[in-house]
Image (cartoon, helix red, strand yellow):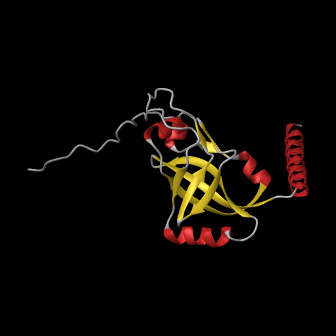
Amino acid sequence: MTITTPAHEPKPAVKEKDRDPVAAGKRDAAFNRSASFNYFLTDKFECGVALRGTEVKSIREGKANLKDAYGLLKDGECFLLNAHIGPFSHGNAMNHESLRTRKLLLHRHELHKLQAASKQKGFTLIPVRLYFRNGRVKCEIALAKGKAEYDKRATERKREADNEAKSAIVRSQRR
C-alpha cells in the first residue's frame, strides 16, 4: 500500500504589518545635515547609545536632533553631548531630560583609534546620523576636521553645479 502525500502548495503571502520606517530601520531617525557642510568627515564609526526607555520612544516619533551635538572622549569612554531628544509625548513625571549627556558604546580598539586621532590638532567627534538596527538605536560618529570659509563656499559651488547638471539631464530627456 502506497501513501501519497499532498503536494506542498506555497502558503499565501502574509501581509506584514505596516511598520514605521524609522522603527524598521529603513530611514534615519535623525541626520546631521550641517556636519558635512561645516567639517571634512574622515573615519566613521557605528556605536550604540545608552538610552532610557522614553528616549527610544521619542526617537521613534522623530524627535531627535543632532545639529549642535558632538562627541567627547573622557577616561577611556565616549559620550554624546548636546544631542537633543525631545520629551516623549505620553511620558509621565519620570520623563527624560532633553539635552542630557549620553554614553556611546564602542569597542576598546575603536576607542583607542578615536583617542589617538582626536588628539591631533583640529580633529573632533561629530555625530552624523541616528538610526535603528535590529531594534536598537545606533549612532554613526565621524572624526571631523573643521572647514575654512573658502572650503564651505567651494562645497556650495560644487553642489549647485551638480544640481544644474542633473536638471539639464532631466530637461534633455523630456524632449
Observer-nearest of 41 and 157: 41
- Return the residue found at the far left: 1
Residue appearing at x 87%, y 49% in the figure: 156
Residue appearing at x 47%, y 46% in the figure: 51
Residue appearing at x 55%, y 49% in the figure: 101
| Side (left or right) of 30 relative to 155 | left
Note whether 2 is above or below 15 in the view shown.
below
Observer-nearest of 68 and 163: 68
Observer-nearest of 83 and 47: 83
Where is residue 55 drawn, in percent x and y?
50, 39
Image quarter (top left, top right, bottom left or bottom right) of the C terminus: top right
| Side (left or right) of 41 relative to 171 | left
| Side (left or right) of 154 relative to 126 | right
Where is residue 163 drawn, in percent x and y?
85, 45
| Side (left or right) of 6 relative to 14 | left
Where is residue 82 drawn, in percent x and y?
63, 46
Q: Quadrant of residue 120?
A: bottom right
Count of numbered tags: 0
Residue appearing at x 89%, y 42% in the figure: 172
Note whether 145 is above or below 59 in the view shown.
below
